[in-house]
């Protein structure tokens, strides 16, 4: 069960444009990578099948990927350098000629599919270049095949399964490089850096008065044992900003409970929904000693996210840490479930819609996406800390909250942003590091602050207990 098959591949198209249509039927031996995978496993190697925990009377539509509890099988994954380019992945059962698994969803740095409880025999794996013209590093990819036993279905007793959020240090800073056009849902990736002087889209300027925008990449990873599952209902109320998001809490017996996670909002310009309290971006001025100020000098307008699986950060790790891709675009654009209820929140006029982040995956909001910026119109040049805080109000229940803030020190000079130092993820309640501190000192400060935080919480709990 520990066997791993690895291979390397590359896009054969010298133009880097990929192939259209990007299906296995459009392939030739010179354009796509293809090989036969022979499965020969002992009987009962894969005892559990997929399970989809949902509320009563609700059925998920599996267009976005496998179930939240995917079951056992053979995990087949390909991975490339960035989410700017794309490959498609197909697995065919050669005994029937049918496609039994496929990864064709956009906007990711990987495709990862589960061959669910396969029979012994031959399967054909085909990798199709879709488009690979943005970064030369994306012209090649790595692939792996390994047995997978679903960790969510191996608890001896009913266990609550929770996600855990890790916010990475902000990166890839820009003041400039977006065209003088309104934003669009997929951002702007079509020209080299330096082509445009604009740092704000026209609709950002019109709506908020922003004329100088500090743009950057933000990555939120799920490092927990269960997916982050968010659900809301399509309805006339939801379209008019009366949208409420529910978090589904999974248990190992494939049941779910709901909790109110806070508001969601519909964006008419881009025709999709965001979970509104996912995060906030802040900018802190740093003095000559490297110490950040007590209050931010600027903050983001954007706090909402349409959550999907973009970054397969566990590729190459043991199978127990990996998951097949489950959530992908456009799961925050269209309803992807239905119900047999005739009234209530999921009646025919309000079908449910799911979005989320699978364990082992991260959601990346790249610098060029709309509203992905801090307004620095009135911020002078200097040293600053860019701080990204996820789940700032605790609306999402998680197994721990130790890694929800990412911090990067930057030097801003005109339209140039230089990264000075990036820090490991820390809790939202921890003090910000100084730009001159070593990583070891920062960790020691965090540990001391955590001990004080726990002592304060313990004393506060005793006071409440005595009061009752």
Image: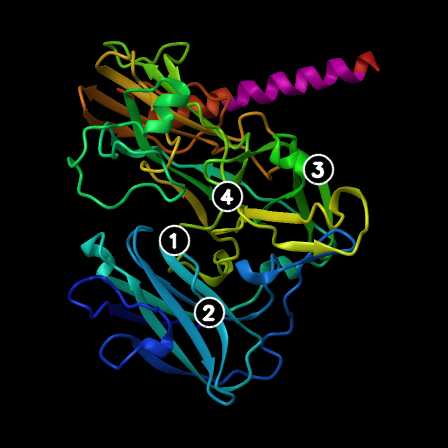
Cβ atoms at labels 3 and 1 below 8 Å apart: no
Q: Residues within 10 Å of mark 4 (few under 14, many from 20)?
A: many
- Residues under labels 1 and 2: Cα distance? 14 Å
Q: Which image quadrant: the C terminus?
A: top right
Task: Return the x and y of residue 256 as percentages of the image width and height.
Answer: 72, 49
- Residues under labels 4 and 3: Cα distance? 18 Å
Sequence order check, earlier mark of 2 and 4: 2
Q: Is residue 240 left or right of residue 403?
A: right
Q: Secondary structure at mark 3?
A: strand
Circle on res. 102: 2
The residue indicated by pointer 3 is 259
Give the magenta range: 450-465
The residue indicated by pointer 4 is 307
Q: Residue at x 39, y 52 (%)?
A: 107
Q: Residue at x 46, y 43 (%)?
A: 221
Task: Return the x and y of residue 172 as percentages of the image width and height.
Answer: 27, 36
Cβ atoms at labels 4 and 3 below 8 Å apart: no
Answer yes or no: is residue 57 visible: yes
Please state which of the two labelled residues, at mark 4 or mark 3, is closer to the viewer.
4
Q: Is residue 50 left or right of residue 88?
A: right
The residue indicated by pointer 1 is 108
Sequence order check, earlier mark of 4 and 1: 1
Please state which of the two labelled residues, at mark 2 or mark 3, is closer to the viewer.
2
- In the image, 466 versus 386, the foreground residue is 386
- Residues under labels 2 and 3: Cα distance? 33 Å
């Amino acid at each position: 069960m520990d066997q791993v098959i690895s291979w390397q591949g590359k896009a054969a198209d010298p133009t880097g444009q990929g192939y259209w249509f990007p299906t296995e039927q459009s392939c030739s031996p010179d354009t796509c990578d293809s090989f036969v995978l022979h499965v020969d496993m002992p009987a009962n190697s894969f005892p559990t099948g997929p399970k989809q925990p949902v509320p009563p009377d609700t059925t998920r539509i599996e267009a976005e990927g496998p179930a939240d509890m995917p079951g056992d099988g053979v995990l087949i994954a390909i991975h490339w350098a960035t989410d700017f380019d794309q490959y498609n992945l197909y697995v065919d059962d050669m005994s029937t000629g049918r496609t039994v698994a496929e990864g064709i969803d956009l906007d990711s740095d990987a495709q990862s599919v589960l061959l669910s409880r396969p029979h012994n025999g031959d399967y054909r794996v085909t990798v199709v270049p879709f488009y690979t013209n943005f970064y030369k590093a994306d012209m090649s990819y790595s692939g792996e095949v390994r047995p997978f036993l679903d960790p969510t279905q191996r608890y001896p007793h009913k266990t609550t399964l929770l996600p855990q959020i890790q916010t990475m240090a902000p990166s890839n800073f820009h003041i400039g490089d977006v065209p003088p056009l309104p934003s669009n849902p997929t951002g702007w990736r079509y020209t080299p850096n330096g082509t445009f002087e604009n740092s704000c889209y026209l609709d950002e300027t019109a709506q908020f008065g922003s004329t100088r925008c500090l743009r950057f990449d933000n990555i939120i990873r799920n490092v927990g044992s269960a997916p982050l599952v968010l659900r809301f209902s399509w309805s006339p109320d939801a379209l008019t900003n009366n949208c409420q998001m529910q978090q589904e809490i999974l248990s190992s017996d494939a049941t779910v409970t709901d909790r109110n996670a806070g508001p969601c909002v519909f964006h008419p310009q881009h025709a999709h929904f965001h979970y509104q309290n996912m995060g906030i971006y802040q900018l802190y001025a740093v003095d000559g000693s490297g110490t950040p100020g007590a209050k931010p000098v600027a903050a983001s307008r954007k706090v909402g996210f349409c959550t999907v699986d973009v970054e397969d950060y566990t590729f190459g790790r043991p199978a127990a840490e990996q998951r097949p891709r489950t959530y992908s675009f456009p799961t925050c654009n269209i309803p992807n479930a239905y119900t047999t209820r005739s009234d209530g929140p999921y009646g025919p006029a309000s079908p449910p819609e799911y979005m989320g982040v699978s364990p082992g995956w991260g959601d990346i909001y790249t610098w060029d996406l709309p509203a992905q910026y801090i307004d620095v119109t009135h911020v002078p040049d200097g040293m600053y800390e860019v701080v990204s805080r996820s789940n700032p109000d605790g609306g999402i229940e998680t197994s721990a909250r130790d890694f929800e803030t990412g911090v990067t020190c930057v030097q801003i000079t005109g339209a140039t942003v230089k990264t000075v130092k990036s820090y490991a993820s820390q809790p939202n309640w921890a003090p910000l590091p100084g730009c001159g501190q070593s990583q070891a000192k920062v960790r020691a400060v965090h540990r001391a602050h955590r001990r004080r935080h726990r002592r304060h919480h313990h004393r506060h709990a005793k006071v409440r207990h005595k009061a009752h």
